[in-house]
Image: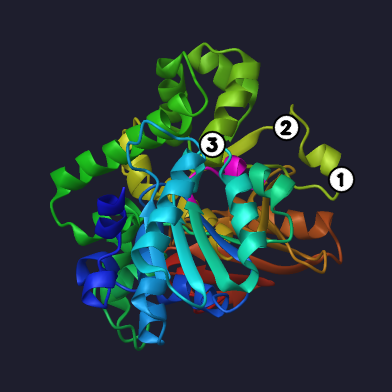
Amino acid sequence: MKEIVKRWNPWWLYGKVPETKKRIARPETLGWITKLLNIKEIICISGVRRCGKSTIQFQIIDHLIENGIAPTNILYFNLDEPFEDKSISILDSIFENYIEINNPSGRKYIFLDEIQNIENWEKWLKKYYDLYDIDIKFVITGSNSTMLSDKMSTLLTGRVISKTVYPLSFNEYLGFMEFELKDTDVQRSEVVHHFLNYLNNGGFPEVVLETDVDINHMRLNEYFDSILLRDIVVGKKIRESSKLIELANYALTNISALLSYMKISKAIGMSVSSVKEYLQYLEQAYLIYQLNFFSYSIKTSLAIQKPRKIYCIDNGLRNAASFKFSSDEGKLAENSAFIELKRRNLDVYYWKGRREVDFVVKNKDNTLMGVNVTYSDVIDEREIKALLEFKENFQGRVSELILLTRNVDKSEDGITYIPIWKWLLGSGE
């Protein structure tokens, strides 16, 4: 164990984090975390596999060393290692070996990656959190939302601050492309070029940095298999793995469409209860999101007979794993918009009267924002009528109407038209 612990912590020997570990910075994602390093609470970083959680941890470690923290006061360990023993004793062994090797004085920073792989990890974390008080700071990551939230809600209430990390935003993507954005009007053509690549290939960091199309296709399929097999089939002890895979393929093929549990059940030959259960597993692993109908009544919003809309965590992953027969740019644009709304930590739904509004954002003051996505410069009248019907239906409650387009940029009849690439960059919101 001593050898493994040393191998994961090269800064003990060299005094710095290797460049290969730090990769490219993500200022948007890192900013909020560094603010939390001086307080006592555990930082929990969650998100889909391969979205960059480990790299972010290495970047935080680099930040600590740059700001005067002794390298030997920082421990990192990846719990995705294939240990036969997944009991709590592995955490005791890691920590005891760390103390034996360094015996650091003062505050210790403990980074535990993919902690959900260890049984009863939350009991161990609570014990050491309470035992060391301000002399220990934990930063943990995990790839399963429910496993983390359930465990933390029981034993770690009030001790954890959580943040979901997503694949790269379009802003971060441009950073990875070493593209310096100065003026969206002047650089419009270049930005649109990068946006089209982002729209189709997604934002997984390793995929963005790789130029070989075949390698990326294989890599994305491997991500898909890993999420299904490691996070769901093994974790949930699923026997019908072929049905789970079929359901995942169906869901990704039909992103943005209105789907009832009954419709999915008939399409792939599963019971309604199994469809509901398996979709929940896919959501817990951050592969998909299910969007509910908007109503001020929670009971109406969550009613089982109401169809859901399904979105995928990443366009590239969706394209690699789904059965698609066209470029699907409209669906991909809508999917990108949804993930960006989630990234902005907004409360999102859809709404349908005579016509459909893609996204309804419920603001903290209970006012509403309606957003439709049409990846076109020839705007269909139904997109406009849907937003206006929505506004009429919730009179006095609607603060903003937005129509995300291909390139149309204007305001008319109370609707703000914004090119989706510009909206993703946060300009023209």
Q: Which of 12 and 138 is in front in this view?
A: 12
185 sits left or right of 415 in the view:
left
Question: Circle 3 sits on which residue?
Answer: 119
Q: Quadrant of residue 246?
A: top left
Choose between 218 and 312: the one closer to the eye. Answer: 218
Sooner in the amino-acid sequence: mark 1 or mark 3: 3
In the rendering, which numbered label is found on residue 158? none
Amino acid found under the numbered disc labelled 1: Ser
Q: How far across and down, in percent of the image, does residue 284 sit?
A: 56, 39
Residue at mark 1 to residue at mark 2: CA–CA distance: 13 Å
Please name the residue shown 47% across and 76% down the image: 105
Disc 1 crowd, CA 10 A, few/some/many (<14, 14-19, 20+): few
Q: Disc 1 versus disc 3: distance between alpha carbons?
A: 38 Å
Magenta-colored span: 142-149
Residue 225 percent location from the top left of the image = 33, 32
- Of circles 1 and 3, the one toward us is 3
The disc labelled 3 sits on which kind of residue? Glu
Q: How crowded is mark 2: few (under 14 residues within 10 Å), some or many (20 or more)?
A: some
Say which amino acid is labelled 2: Lys
Which quadrant would the C terminus be assigned to in this image? bottom right
Classify residue 187 as left or right of residue 231: left
- Identify the element where label 2 is drawn: loop
Q: Which residue lies under the disc numbered 1?
A: 297
